[in-house]
Image (cartoon, helix red, strand yellow):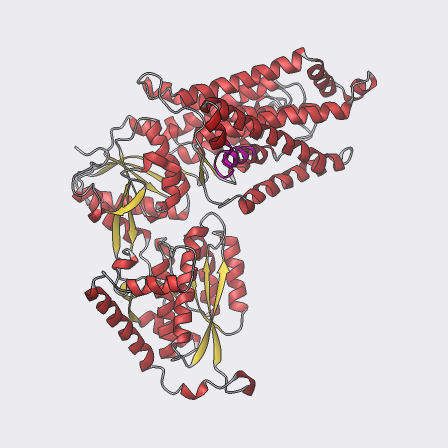
Amino acid sequence: MELIISQILNAVMLACTYTLVGIGFSLFFGAMDIVVFCLGDVAIAGAFAIMALSTVMGVYASLSGILPAPISGIIVVFIGACFTAGLVTLMYRAVIVPFEGKNINASLLSTIAAGIVIRELIGLFYPEGRNPHAFPQLLPAGLIGDNVLLSWRNIIIIAITFIMVMLLYWFVNRTKTGLSIQAISQNKEAAIMVGINWHRIIVITFLIGGFLLGIGGFLTASYFNSLRFDMGAMYGLKGFCVAVVGGLGSIYGAIVGGLLIAFVEVFVTAFIPGGTAYSSVAAFLIVVLFILFKPEGILGEKTVEKV
Amino acid sequence: MFKGKPIGKIAAGLGALIFLLGILAGCGGGTKSQEAPKQEGGSQKKVVKIAFIGPLTGPNATEGVGPRNTFELAVNQANKSGKLPFEIKFLAYDDASNPGTAASVAQKIVAEPDVVAASGHWNTACAEATIPIFKAAGIPMVIWGAIGPSLTKEENFPYITRVCPTSVQENIPLAAFVMDQLGRKKWALISSTSVYGKANTEAWQAEVKKRSGAEIVSLDEITDGSTDFRPILSKIKKLNVDGLYYGGNIMEAALIRSQMNELGMKDILMAGISGIVSPKFIEVAGQAAEGVVVTQPGKEPKKMPGGKEFIEEYQKAGYKEPYGAYGAYAYDAANIIITALKEAGTDRKALADKIGKIAYTGLLGTTSFDKTGQTTNSLSTIYVIQDGKFVDWDESKYKTGERKLPGAK
């Protein structure tokens, strides 16, 4: 029983690391009708930015001198997430805008290429960029009680993911800008006709999505205690799978999809003898099945014929 | 300069060096008149090229740059000795730990005129990609750092030889240490699905089978690049094992160790082969790295015969990077090629035959090759991580009993 509980917790944690990047895919697909494939790399770039602020550039250390540690941690993560938001918006300007209105595959390919560029730039220019790095521990590490399964870090990761999703929910459903995003995602032409500034809304969507990705990258790197320049490739792929399974364009779908993919991976590893090597295979198989038989995903409304 | 250093060792080292020079001198006759200035054409020294391949960039760059330097050092020393009937040109190529890159680099090398021999690879997969190329071109390759057991085969001899022990050879002293000396019998095994990982899995299974009472209670294969091992570890935790063996590379090993710590499995001994020996392992695993037992082929160069001179020469040459775990192997590989070149000349076939039959005494002791081209010299050392450093077991606080290994009774 304890084994099952610990495996469930492992799966929930893994789902948290997938969810935010999955939401990123959904958000951009909803707003733009294109899949931005460089999101995993963007998120990992955000984590690298946070690591740089904490170690190489010493911002965290100098902040900790004046402010209590948790607050300087929050500031560093906030700066890192803002950097990520800037980066993804730059990606939008650089690799998506030039292909607007052209063949949908063009922007798809250009975002894949952009992901490779980000990955390689980190590898080339971050000090010892191609080696694995220990990620600075900005989250408290202690256990809650004497139960090894519940550490403060895990609780905080779950809590931050939850808060981010709630904030996004509030933003999308309760603010004018959020409602405009929804309007554009439902019918772009009609939205433009009623006076919604399409370009402005798209940029805002990218800023918000990028901020979420930065937080997602930070949580993932914190959960694994480590960071490597090429982690983004697999992270992005899993995020895409999560979004497809949950339903591209649906924010809650990303949560459901994240849980489903994470549970499949963990339980294949834990309960199928010799299954470890095939856990990712099983996850991707689920995605293939969804694309074949339920392409709109669990909660989605649109079809994914464009991917 | 030698103040406070044991004179005996220095003398022994110098002796070895003189002996070496003697070998070189013995076959260098009749070359004195060839120092003519280059402008005179014809009479200038013939140039032969030796190629070095290793991961100079990419995830394992730290493993390749040191050996590149030591290899170059050996070539420069040989050229400087003035006793060669030709000048050796050193070429360094980068395989970036990528078999595809390795193969294209090997094609480039075999197309290069005057290349007589090559020495290559830290990654087994890269060596697998280039062996057929070198063999087809008839260029002898001495492997300096790839340890997959299948690389040296009878049909490739004498073109493919190897100066470092295979992963199988590495597992023998490690198994003897943890199973016989420490008495750990019940093992969980995690390996990478790569060729390297699979070879280690098989080697460890074979070692366990040899010992009555020893058993492997769980086996998990993971793909390189995975980051979440908690599901596997949660499962292993229930099995009350004496030790966890990991056969793979640094990043995954470090994550496994730090996640073990997180799940409250600090008291399970972790053991591994040289693939996980790197300061990066300690950096990423942090505190959790304490007490991990590893093996590494060879000895610390300073304890090798002639090692002091080697280290001094290396520093004098001004290399910034450490010579690394395989530095001594690359150095001996270079000297084996050079020695054979002196004796057999520049004909590739004759050179390959000569390398195959060599008995070369260098830093590693005496290296000679068996009928598959594998070195018969399997020198190794057990290390334990103590206070964030790899410490020779014989010098560690764990041996003296001052500290206890994870899970020690």
Q: Position of residue B299 (x, y in %)?
A: 27, 56
B345 up-or-down from B268: above or below: below
Residue found at the far front of this picture? A66
Quadrant of the image occupied by residue A205: top right
Residue A29, position as x, y percentages in the image = 67, 26
Quadrant of the image containing the C terminus of chain A = top right
Q: Quadrant of the N terminus of chain A?
A: top left
Furthest-top residue in this view = A174
Q: Is residue A272 visible?
A: no
On screen, residue B236 above or below B331: above
List x then y, in percent, for residue B33.
43, 88
Judge by depth and name the residue closer to the eye, B265 or B289: B289
In the picture, measured across the screen, residue A145 lies left or right of residue B69, that is left
Q: Residue at x 33, y 80 (%)?
A: B25
**Residue B234 part of the magenta-drawn span:** no
Residue stretch in magenta: A46-59
At x 42% / y 23%, what residue is drawn? A153
Report the front residue among B274 and B280. B280
Q: Is residue B10 left or right of residue A248?
A: left
Left or right: A229, with B12 as reference point: right
Q: Is residue A35 visible?
A: yes
Most extreme residue toward the right is: A193
Q: Is residue A48 magenta?
A: yes
Asked whether B99 or A39 is in front, the reply is A39
